[in-house]
């Protein structure tokens, strides 16, 4: 884009995102990127349309638009993504938190709040997040459960992802959380006092043959896809969960829109009861829960 005032750029964004079938970029990505580059609040785009971008701002803006056209998501350019009203740092080592995943957080909190309160027992409740990535699920839950004597353990195989997750816990002032490098349950003990009241996970669940993977080139593929039609990691997590859950404990897993029936069957085959699937905001099967 050669335009240099906000008014001209807004006009170009409109042209770029309307009627160009080859450009699937959402217009808010471009306006949010513009605000990031000029470091101004959203109202500035209305009140200061004559603001002229400096050469370096224009260069940065255009370079970012080019990267987005090539498949880099906005969040990787700004290094930030909001989730559950908290702010998270993201980079190429972590998936970008998605609104659908908030359904998982919401369902777990609903279940916790529905449980009878144990009187006279000061032992902390324990929650495990498997494959934490940016930490968005674990940190959001720990943030909500801060005053309720809960301790969260978040594991990931990637040391780089854990660095980001630890940083995200710090910037969101969450301290009731511990981070551990582990391939799923591998580094976790199974002694009674180390068992969990809740296990949550948003594991890789896209089929390795899925054509949509080609469009997700910027994000870590190992965190997105799995063998066995995307069910391999989910199957392992469900099979092993009873060893790590207290009696009556909850397992909650995010999965693909077409995997609800298969995941429910996995839960039932491994001794879970009260098994049910919750839909996301788009009406698609998204989270399956069950108690052991």
Image (tube, helix red, strand yellow):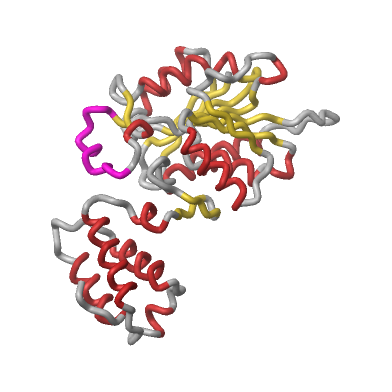
Residue at the extreme bottom of the image, as rendered? 50
Residue at 35 percent across and 30 percent down: it is 205
Residue 225, placed above or below residue 240: below
Q: Quadrant of the N terminus?
A: bottom left
- 225 left or right of 47? left
Horizontally, is 261 left or right of 3 in the view? right
Q: Residue at x 46, y 73 (%)?
A: 41
Q: How far across and how far down the image is residue 148, in percent?
A: 73, 40
Q: Is 253 contained in the magenta span? A: no
The answer to whether residue 212 is magenta is: yes
Q: Is residue 261 left or right of residue 237?
A: left
Instruction: Indicate the quadrant where residue 227 lies.
Output: top left
Q: Is residue 186 above or below residue 123?
A: above
Which residue of the protein is positioned furthest toward the front in this rendering? Answer: 56
Magenta stretch: give its range: 207-218
Residue at position x 41%, y 84% in the image: 47
- Quarter holding the C terminus? top right
Identified at 62% across, 48% down, the residue is 170
Nearer to me, 292 or 214 = 214
Q: Position of residue 286 (x, y in %)?
A: 40, 36
Q: Position of residue 131 (x, y in %)?
A: 48, 31
Left or right of residue 165: residue 236: left
């Amino acid at each position: 884009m050669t335009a240099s005032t906000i008014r001209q750029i807004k006009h170009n964004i409109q042209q770029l995102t309307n009627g160009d079938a080859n450009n699937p970029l959402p217009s808010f990505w471009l306006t949010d990127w513009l605000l990031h580059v000029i470091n101004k609040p959203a109202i500035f785009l209305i009140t200061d349309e004559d603001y002229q971008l400096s050469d370096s701002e224009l260069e940065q803006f255009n370079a970012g638009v080019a990267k987005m056209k090539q498949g880099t998501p906005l969040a990787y350019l700004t290094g930030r993504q909001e989730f559950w009203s908290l702010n998270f740092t993201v980079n190429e080592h972590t998936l970008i938190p998605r609104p659908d995943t908030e359904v998982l957080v919401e369902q777990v909190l609903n279940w916790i709040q529905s449980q009878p309160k144990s009187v006279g027992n000061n032992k902390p409740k324990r929650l495990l997040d498997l494959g934490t990535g940016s930490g968005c699920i674990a940190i959001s839950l720990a943030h909500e459960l801060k005053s309720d004597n809960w301790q969260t353990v978040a594991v990931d195989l990637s040391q780089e992802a854990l660095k980001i997750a630890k940083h995200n816990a710090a910037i969101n002032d969450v301290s009731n959380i511990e981070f551990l490098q582990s391939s799923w349950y591998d580094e976790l003990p199974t002694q009674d006092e180390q068992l969990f009241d809740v296990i949550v996970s948003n594991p890789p669940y896209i089929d390795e043959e899925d054509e949509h993977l080609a469009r997700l080139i910027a994000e870590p593929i190992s965190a997105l896809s799995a063998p066995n039609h995307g069910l391999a990691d989910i199957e392992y997590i469900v099979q092993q969960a009873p060893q790590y859950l207290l009696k009556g404990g909850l397992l909650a897993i995010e999965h693909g829109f077409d995997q609800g029936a298969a995941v429910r069957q996995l839960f039932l085959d491994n001794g879970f009861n009260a098994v049910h699937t919750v839909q996301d905001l788009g009406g698609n099967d998204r989270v399956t829960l069950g108690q052991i």
